[in-house]
Image (cartoon, grey):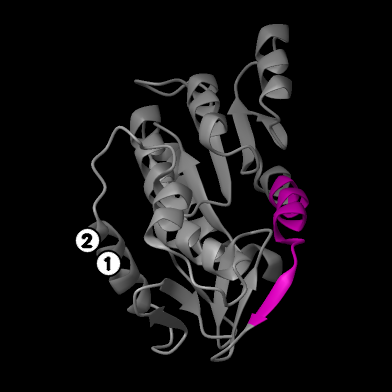
Amino acid sequence: MKILKNLNILYVEDEDTIIDKYAYFLEELCREVYIARDGEEAFRIFEENNIHLVILDLLIPKLNGINLAKKIRQIDDNVALIALTAHSDREILLDIVDLNFSSYLIKPVGRSDLMNALLKVSKKVDGGRNIPLPCDCSWDSKSKTLFCEERAVTLTKRESKLFELLVEKAGAPCSDDEIFFYVWGDEFNKVITNSSIRTLVKNLRKKIPHNLIKNQYGVGYKINF
């Protein structure tokens, strides 16, 4: 059960009665639960936050579950997906296999079945390499989770990407060009400025110990190993 406390979950469901049934259950188990009622809203939430696991009904408005999963897979091959479906026909099952879903559950879903699926997936997500950091912090490279004083820090998707890069550099400074490529590499059509990096670092520093990230003047940012 403690494994689940490290996870951010995106729960995608359009029926309020079902959301009411499971949202509190999930919130009790996991670190953060984001709820979306259609596929387009779900994709926006996924892009803006560090999501470890997506639980999605396949029959949702605006962008159905399969097409949502395809868009997610275009930017993240590793995030865990659990499908909720009222049907189990061959075409749906082939899509689920092709998109590397971790599990699929036929609705109506019992809490024990959902719990078993969550535990199965969470062990894979959480089985990463724990990297000790200064200031009583650590980084789980599998779940991409930052811990400070043994408490998980909630990061946005870009903040998580930036911190992941800093950890991988192992104390060597990261230039602005490196950060642009790593954090905004899939958004070359957008105008990204140096002030975008300054703002990202500033917001990240508000969530972590003050001396964890250093700015080496004229060179770049680094973790103060």
When the figure is inspected, residue 52 is found, relative to residue 219, above or below; the finding is: above
Q: Which residues are magenta?
A: 116-132
Packing grade of label 2 (10 A; few <14, some 14-19, many >=20) is: few
The location of residue 39, given as percent across then percent down, is 40, 29
Q: Disc 2 marks which amino acid?
A: Ser
The quarter of the displayed image where residue 94 is located: top right
User: What residue sits 54% from the left and 62% below the top?
Assistant: 165
Residue bearing mark 2? 195
Q: Name the image quarter holding the C terminus.
A: bottom right
Residue under the point 60% across and 30% down: 84
Circles 1, 2 touching at the beta carbon (< 8 Å):
yes
Give the residue type at disc 1.
Arg
Would you say residue 96 sits in the magenta stretch? no
* Main SS class of the magenta portion in the image: helix
Residue 53 at x, y percent in the picture: 59, 47
| Foreground of the two, 53 or 166 | 166
User: Alpha carbon of mark 1 to alpha carbon of mark 2: how far?
Assistant: 5 Å
Q: Which residue is more in the foreground, 214 or 82?
A: 214
According to the picture, the residue beneath numbered tag 1 turns out to be 198
At x 65%, y 62%, the residue is: 4
